Amino acid sequence: GTQEVAKQLIEVYGEDRILLKPRAGKLGLGTAYIHGLNFCTGNFVIIMDADFSHHPKFIPEFIKLQQQYNLDIVTGTRYRSSTTPSLRGGNVTPGGVYGWDLKRKVISRGANFFADTVLNPGVSDLTGSFRLYRREVLRNVISQVQSKGYVFQMEMMARARAMGYTVGEVPITFVDRIFGESKLGADEIVGFAKGVWALFTSI
């Protein structure tokens, strides 16, 4: 499991570089974020998948964009070819996805198009999770979020925009996980549509 791998990495790199704070059972992504925030010491937090679906090579671009425009949030996007706002002095690779079949790509594109049309948050990749936040912005947004599962990341962006926070986007290439299984079925799709409607009526 993930915890055992993390323990092995701690033995290699040390507790000063890797901090493992396990919880009892699966309690939801939102509460996991809040739990992690309790151990953050800096002014900014980067959230990403640790299986290299999100490659750390994009982090410097996130930081540059945040610094140039003093942004509250920088999110990775699979669906843009350039940063927004425009990154000065950056060499950006267009976003994309690798390892997905056509069905998965169509569902993801369709979900983002549907949510963007209904909610109009001005963010091209609402379902992605590779993001940089000001620590207090992340704490404030999470306190307002009610969704779980596939809808959670979308609501994070919709709420952040509604609360007046500034958001920038950096193109990333997403590589589907080699180990583990991505869970996206009919129940998740229906739940996503219901979540979009709930946000439309509440924000």
Image: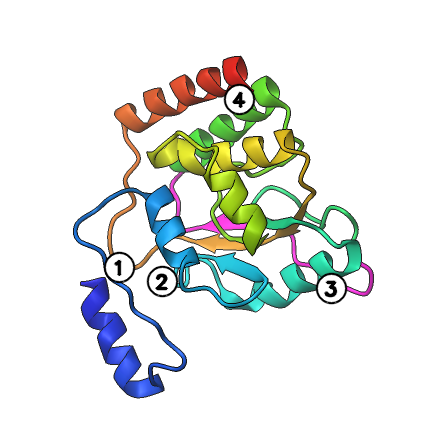
Residue labelled with disc 2: 51
Q: Which residue shows up at 47% across the image and 15% down it?
A: 197
Residue 176 picture location, percent across and down: 38, 52
Residue 195 picture location, percent across and down: 42, 22
Mark 1 vs 4, N-terminal side: 4
Residue 91 picture location, percent across and down: 73, 64
Three-letter amino acid code of the residue under disc 1:
Phe
Q: Residues within 10 Å of mark 2 (few under 14, many from 20)?
A: some
Mark 3 vs 2, N-terminal side: 2
Residue labelled with disc 1: 179
Residue 26 picture location, percent across and down: 21, 46
Gap in angstroms between the C-alphas marked 4 and 2: 28 Å
Marks 1 and 2 in Cβ contact (< 8 Å): yes
Q: Is mark 4 on a helix, strand or loop?
A: helix
- Picture disc at residue 91: 3
Marks 3 and 2 in Cβ contact (< 8 Å): no
Q: Residues within 10 Å of mark 3 (few under 14, many from 20)?
A: few
Which residues lie in the magenta part? 87-102
Three-letter amino acid code of the residue under disc 2:
Asp
